[in-house]
Amino acid sequence: MFEPISFHSAIHLLIVLVFPPLLLGVINRTKAKFGGRRGQPVLQSYYDLAKLMQKDCVFSDTTSWVFRFGPVVGLVTAIVAAMIVPLGHSSAPLSFTGDLIMFAYVLALGRFFTMAAALDTGSAFEGMGAAREATFAVLAEPVLFLGLLVLARTSGSLKMSDMLGDGAASGWSTAAAPMLLIVAAWFVVTLVENCRIPFDDPNTHLELTMIHEVMVLDHSGPTLGLIVYAAAVKLFVFAGLIVKLVLPFGSGSALVDWILFLIGTLLVAVVIGTIESVMGRLKMSEIPKLLIGAGVVSLFAVILLLSNQ
Amino acid sequence: MSSTELVFSAIVLSAASGWPAVLLPPRMRLGQWIAVVMNVIGCGLGLAGVWSFLQSRASEPVRWQSPLAGFELSFALDGLSAFFLVPVLLVCALASIYSLQYWPHVARGVAEESAANARRVSLLLGMMTAAMVWLVFARDGIGFLFGWEVMAVSAFFLVAAEDQYLETRKAAWLYIAASHFATLCAFGVFGLLYSQTGSMAYATLPTSTSTAAIAIAVLALVGFGTKAGLMPMHVWLPGAHAAAPSHVSAVMSGVMIKMGVYGIFRVASFFPEIPLSWGVITLVVGTVSAILGVAFAIGQHDIKRLLAYHSIENIGIIAMGLGVALIGRAMHQPAWVLLGSCGSLLHVWNHALFKSLLFFGAGSVVHSTGSRDLDIMGGLSRHMPATASCFLIGSVAICGLPPLNGFVSELLIYLALFGTIQLPPGTASASLTSTAAFAAPGLALVGALAVACFVKVYGIVFLGAARSEQASKAHESGGAMTGPMFVLAGLCVLIGVAPMLFAPILQSATSTWVAADADMAASMAELKLAALAPLATVSVMAAILLIGIGAGTFFLMWHVRLSPTADTWGCGYAAPSATMQYTSSSFAQWLVDLFGWALRPKVHRLRIDTLFPKDAAFESHVDDTVLEQVVGPMTRLVRWLFGLSRYLQQGSLQAYLLYILVIVIGLMLWTSRA
């Protein structure tokens, strides 16, 4: 069934639990540097999470148990997804044929309950965020799957650990053009799924311009902490996908692989921070165009792959 | 008793269940109780018969020689029919129990008329159950067609149960027209079968490439596809399922459309080999039905019409699974056949379970608020906690999310589709086959749209604040209505958490319909579904998810025991009201715009173009495009053409005598020439 529970799985879990908030710190620090400021400490997100967990929650009278349940599901699904994706050195702890489908649908489960919790507040702001989040997800899911089709063909296997390891390596040697297109398309998916510029501005606190931020507007204290933490884990997972796609080659040693991988994710965070500093958020009507463009690019990648052979 | 005897007694009991109610006085509840008890016992006996068949794997065919026309009817169970019998019996039994409180035999508003309606509904529900069991049990075309017709006609009268409304009558007419079109195609299929094999009994055709074989395939896809609800023949489905009483909609959506799927599977079992193009066409039709079905669903704000469009989407997914299985038969890939077919068949069961659950929930909501309009509901989970939790389980299941049952069937279909892109490049027809893999992102699109739609439905109906007086006065439904919902929800969880329990029955159903193809049957005999698909791992992942979520919830609740409450933060707005919440149309607006090329939403607005504020109005709705743009104009054209014949009806006796004279002279000339 799975790979036997081993030291590597324990390391994988530990890094997934501990490392992600650092990415948020790096992004904010990069944006600060672009703005000529010193910026907050890189470890600020850890301090914020600790502070949030010590506070009280204030729940709205309109909400029901779904509102309290949503953040828990969001966090658990993010961690389970992180356990399916191969990060760093070896294959993922929860690896099996068809785990790519489980990956996508576990994230969809988290999204379902986040949107339901948003609608539970009975406010137009959260409803707006949920509606926009639903629309972006519709446009982004096929892009993810088209990329998975390319990797499935180059690797000949349906386990993400094989697809992102040997599969990506053989992909770069035999089908470099489709792989390049998929990297670009999956980077767009990373920005959408983690609600970054140019799709959503994590800094704005004007409800009319937020998407993810406005969905979680009414959460406070520990539930807000769970949501911020889950967002960080999800960002780490997607950054990890990009790193494994671009650098699938492994050296022999586990330690070197992990260090290179983590540096890679920090570089991805720097790139995201750079994009956030040089671009503004797109006008709402332009966002579907960008997403459909990413879809067309990945469709073209699959067609290239099929016609090449 | 043997399995055939048990199934026969199920047919007899269900068919007879409604008659005592008809013979008793209208307001006596006893009639309804008798009907429900007889129907439930009948269905229970039928399930016992299926169980004993699955244990013994043997079924004595029962033959009946007709004294008149010299034809013979035969009945027997096999893997495929046993598989389809299970949802029929289960859902019909639960719908009977549901009707005790939903459509009781007492006066509701309009006195005698409603009571008569209720007795008719009970009678016809029993007859429809018996007809569906009959048609699945039959082993020849005549038995099949008899059951098919009785099922279709009883469904017509059930859809027209509330025929005092014009919308209901129109929906019922459209339904019976489409249903008879399907019946005509089914007659064509069995007639051609008779011409090829000499009898109407299920048999293997000699060849798949003759004109007759191709005609059988086309007629089967179009005719049974109409009954199943594949696009573009789906036009009857939304209206009929919305107009029917909710427990009848559950039976129609959950099982009756599966009879169309059963017909397609059964006809597919007649062919010794399947050309590649048939599989590709089925896959394309399935993908288009799935995507457009869920797109239309997003635009609806009538809860039952929305659920009806979701049935179209799920039938599309079933057709996708069948399509990839047919492609597998053409390309000699037993893995694709097993995965695609098991995924498709499991989705038949899954959809029967969660769609009936959702319709029962919708019926509960309609019963307590008195309306089907999403935009007047809200906050119902406070008043109806049982309905809300069951509806949530149904929503998560229909979106195909782990750890529930929808995920398992979609996983099997995905595995088959991803398999098609891993075909080695040198194989014959590799490029056409690999394009089948594009259905996988299509299925992902369908899944994301379904999530959007069901978050909308669940959130707007059950969460938030009540948008109208009716919603704030809602009350929970009684045990007869919530009991069936809990049973179905439990089964959804069971199949999601323990799918390997159902692998044997899926595998036996698949080997039954592949049996005509000897090579494929031989290669599939060694394959096991559990080896191809990670069923045990899915159980473990479901357990991990449930334990993780449970532990997280426990931790959170322990951590936030005493929390103050306040109003929802509205950016400091002084007077928030429930009508400021998002409505179903506003939630779906962007998606409806993106799909506007297919949905063609209609907007009616009263603009204010003067200086001072006045009353204004806005209304939008999404009609069925195929009905409005294709079927409507076509029927008007046909009516006009037939209207031209009115010139012959002069109304004067002399003109008619002239017609007779002319025709008689013409006939005399014609016969004297020959």
Image: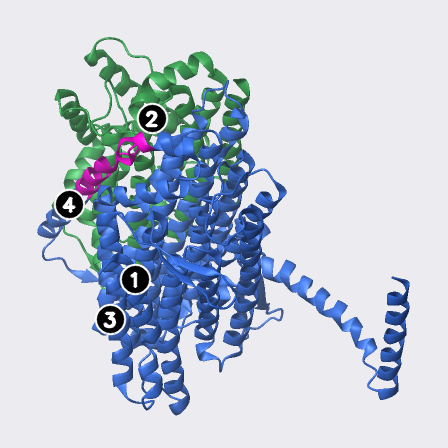
Q: Which residues are magenta?
A: B525-545
User: What label does residue B552 carry, if any?
Assistant: 4
Residue A5 image position (x, y, % from top left): 13, 25
Q: Secondary structure at mark 3?
A: helix
Q: Disc 4 versus disc 1: distance between alpha carbons? A: 47 Å
Which mark sits nearer the N-terminus, 3 or 4? 3
Residue tagged 1: B7
Protein chain holding label 4 = B
Q: Is residue B221 above or below residue B111?
A: above
Residue drawn at x 40%, y 62% is B64
Classed neighbour count for the residue bearing mark 1: other residues with Cα under 10 Å, few (<14), some (14–19), many (≥20): many
Q: Residues within 10 Å of mark 4 (few under 14, many from 20)?
A: some
Chain coloured green in this rendering: A
Chain letter for the residue marked with disc 3 in the picture:
B
Q: Which residue is mark 2?
A: A241
- The image shows residue B189 at horizontal and vertical percentages of 55, 53
- Give the distance between the C-alpha atoms of the residues marked 2 and 4, in whole angstroms: 26 Å
The answer to whether mark 2 and mark 4 are in CB contact below 8 A is: no
Find disc 3 in the rendering and name its residue: B383
**SS at mark 4 in the image:** helix
Crowd class of label 2 (few under 14; some 14 to 19; many from 20; radius 10 Å): many
Q: Residue at x 46, y 63 (%)?
A: B148
Q: Amino acid at mark 2?
A: Leu
Q: Quadrant of the C terminus of chain B?
A: bottom right
* Front residue of B223 and B434: B223
Residue nearest the observer in this picture, B93 or A183: B93
Q: Amino acid at mark 4?
A: Gly
Characterize the magenta stretch by its predominant secondary structure.
helix
Q: Nearer the viewer, residue B117 or B503?
A: B503
Image colour for chain B is blue
